Amino acid sequence: MLYDKNIREPLFDFLDEIYGTNRTLEELMIGKSRADICMITKENIIGIEIKSDADTYVRLKRQVRDYNKYFDMNIVVCGSSHGNHIKEHVPDNWGIITVEETDVNQNDSADSSKSLLSTSCDFYILREPTPNPKVTMLNKLSLLWRPELVEIKDKYNLPKYDYLSKANLILKMEEKIDHELLQKDICEALLERDYNTIGEKIAEYHKSKNITRRQNVKTAVKRKRRSRKKATSR
């Protein structure tokens, strides 16, 4: 029996073989679900749900709903025990990859483009994923952090919009920037995200916002003293 922990590392090797340049983010919160893997390529954001032999379908309906909101394409990777029934539980546009335990001494494969032998698993593409019609640009933009959004906004010379919340900034960007350009920018931002520096950028942004708010408060107090007649995202 294969468990999630047995599948992940060999799966990453398989994805590299099939998709080439990519980046994977694990355990990403999307709506009320947690995506096992979010894979970013130069063109698409792909959600990947793992159903090992030890897993059930109890949460899959909700997970499918949330995955469809955020990802350009989706794939379910399932243990062989689910192979005969998984099609009944995911939409037709979802890709399906089955995984089986393999003999580490075997090194032959009938179709190298469809399977990749690893130290513990053999993967087979049962069905290729196709574009997800339910994903929205608003939800994809929400995967970015505020500094990443600001960098894209500045690229197109939009106003600062410092007064806007992250949600409202996303609305403005979705309205004013061509969606094909945004798609490339989102993928590029996620591919290049540096977790060693992004925290500092977010902290700097929050610090600047706090300074602005304090200055505004002081100005308001001064105005009140001069004339008594005048009466939170990344």
Image: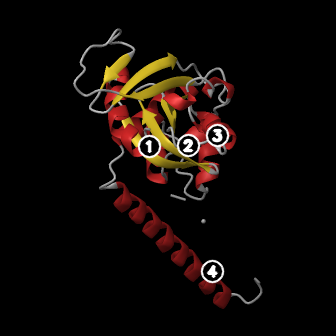
Q: Earlier in the sequence, mark 4 or mark 2?
A: 2
Q: Is residue 209 above or below residue 135?
A: below
Q: Is residue 215 above or below residue 31?
A: below
**Marks 3/2: CA–CA distance:** 7 Å
Mark 4 lies on residue = 220
Residue type of the residue flagged with mark 1: Asp
Confirm or deny contact between disc 2 and disc 1 (CB under 8 A).
yes
Residue at image position (42%, 60%) is 202
Q: Earlier in the sequence, mark 4 or mark 3?
A: 3
**Marks 4/1: CA–CA distance:** 57 Å
Confirm or deny contact between disc 3 and disc 1 (CB under 8 A).
no
Mark 1 lies on residue = 4
**Marks 4/3: CA–CA distance:** 57 Å
Q: Is residue 75 above or below residue 33?
A: above
Q: Position of residue 13 (x, y in %)?
A: 31, 30
Q: Earlier in the sequence, mark 3 or mark 1?
A: 1
**Marks 2/1: CA–CA distance:** 9 Å
- Say the numbered circle drawn on residue 55: 2
Residue mark closest to the camera, 4 vs 2: 2
* Secondary-structure class at tag 4: helix
Closest to the observer, 170 or 199:
199
Residue type of the residue flagged with mark 2: Asp
Mark 3 lies on residue = 57
Confirm or deny contact between disc 4 and disc 1 (CB under 8 A).
no
Q: Would you say 119 lies left or right of 99 here? A: left
Residue mark closest to the camera, 4 vs 1: 1
Confirm or deny contact between disc 4 and disc 2 (CB under 8 A).
no
Residue type of the residue flagged with mark 4: Ala
